[in-house]
Amino acid sequence: MTTKRLQAVRGAVLRADRLLGRAEEMLLAALVTAITCVTFAQVIARYVFESPLIWSEEVARYLFVWIVLIGAAAAVRSNEHFGLDMLRRYMAPLRLLLGLVTMLVVGGFLGLLFYTGTVETMQASTQFSAGLPIRMHWPYLALPVGAGLALLHVIAHWVRAGAGAHPLDAVDADA
């Protein structure tokens, strides 16, 4: 590939990463607003009107699952996830190798999570929710979506910072 072509691909990956990051932020804001409203409505219905909403706990649970998985992807993008960097600090000569191995392990795990999440989502499409008139693939879909977004952010981090970049390396995700 020519240098110009590589730069074009790099630019496209980084633009997609920024776009996905903004979409995740907006989606997370909407999901947190929704779970807050549902929980507040449940409290009002239960304690003020003494008639609990039978569907609210399940909706809140599914919203929480989506918040956690989309939030995990957003944390990967902005390097706000937790990590153990003791080896990286004390074995500076192996920094490049450790970064490469770590990125491959993280990418492999996310790829496996995406694959198994997709399989589980397809299997859940035949089941219905206990308290809601929806198929269970909607709650399960959070797993491959979250894993896929996180994997794309790992790839973008690698493109942005280089092959030996460690996931804990602080790199401006909006650069």
Image (spheres, helix red, strand yellow):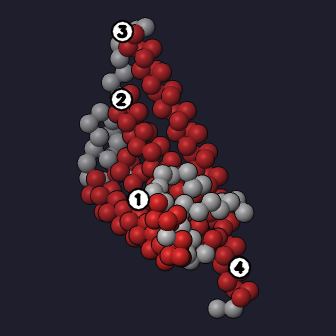
Marks 4/1: CA–CA distance:
28 Å
Please name the residue shown 58% across and 39% down the image: 29
Q: Which mark is residue 8?
A: 4
Which mark's residue is nearer the viewer, 3 or 4? 4
Q: Residue reaching furthest front?
A: 90
Query: Who's the residue at 48% across and 21% down the image?
Result: 40
Marked residue nearer the N-terminal end (1 or 3)? 3
Q: Earlier in the sequence, mark 4 or mark 1?
A: 4
Residue for badge 2: 57
Q: Nearer the viewer, residue 81 or 149?
A: 81
Image quadrant assignment for residue 54: top left
Residue drawn at the location 61% of the way across and 47% of the way down: 25
Q: Residues within 10 Å of mark 3 (few under 14, many from 20)?
A: few
Q: Amino acid at mark 2?
A: Glu
Left or right? Give the position of 156 relative to 174.
Answer: left
**Identity of the residue drawn at 44% across and 74% down:** 101
- Residue 16 occupies which quadrant of the picture? bottom right
User: Where residue 70 sits: x, y (%)?
Assistant: 49, 50
Mark 2 vs mark 4, CA separation in Å: 47 Å
Query: Can the viewer see residue 32?
Result: yes
Type of amino acid under label 1: Pro
User: Which circle's residue, 3 or 4, is located before the other in the chain?
Assistant: 4
